[in-house]
Image (cartoon, rainbow, N blue to C red):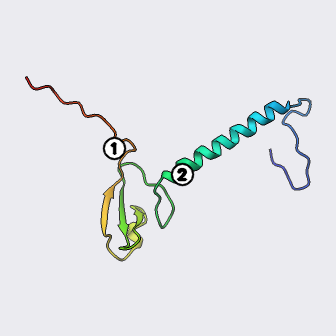
Amino acid sequence: MVIEAGARRRTPNPGATMSSSATHIQLLERVLLRRGLGALEADRSSCADCGRTPLTGEHVHLYGAKQQRMVCELCRPGRRESPLASEIVRHCEHGHTVRLTARAA
């Protein structure tokens, strides 16, 4: 539903009326969704050039001595200088898993 400037807000079904509690629940859901997405986005590393979040298993390249900036594999050919380091993006559970080994007899 598109709302233009100066237009009245309409419900999808003109005959239906929404209770105020349903409206408050919908507003709460939106606030919680936005807060959760903001928290997830804050924890991500993104490319300094294009802003894209690199995928698991993708190579990323680090540039800059004082302030390290990460550049994704797609933006790497656009830079003339060589990177200080290159790394592979690990999955989110890397280092948090338990390794099972066979028991010695």
Q: Position of residue 13 (x, y in %)?
A: 86, 33
Q: Is residue 96 left or right of residue 35?
A: left
Q: Residue furthest top?
A: 105
Q: Secondary structure at mark 2?
A: helix
Residue 44 picture location, percent across and down = 48, 53
Residue appearing at x 92%, y 30% in the figure? 15
> Mark 2, residues whose alpha carbon is within 10 Å: few (<14), some, or many (≥20)?
few
- Give the amino acid at mark 1: His
Residue 84: image x %, image y %? 31, 69
Q: Which residue is mark 2?
A: 41
Q: Camera-side residue: 65 or 49?
A: 65
Q: Mark 1 to mark 2: distance in Å? A: 19 Å
Q: In front: 41, or 89?
A: 41
Is residue 104 placed above or below 29 in the rendered structure? Answer: above
Q: Is residue 34 above or below residue 54?
A: above
Task: Quickly name the residue at label 1.
Answer: 94
Q: Which disc, if any, is residue 56?
A: none
Q: Quadrant of the C terminus?
A: top left
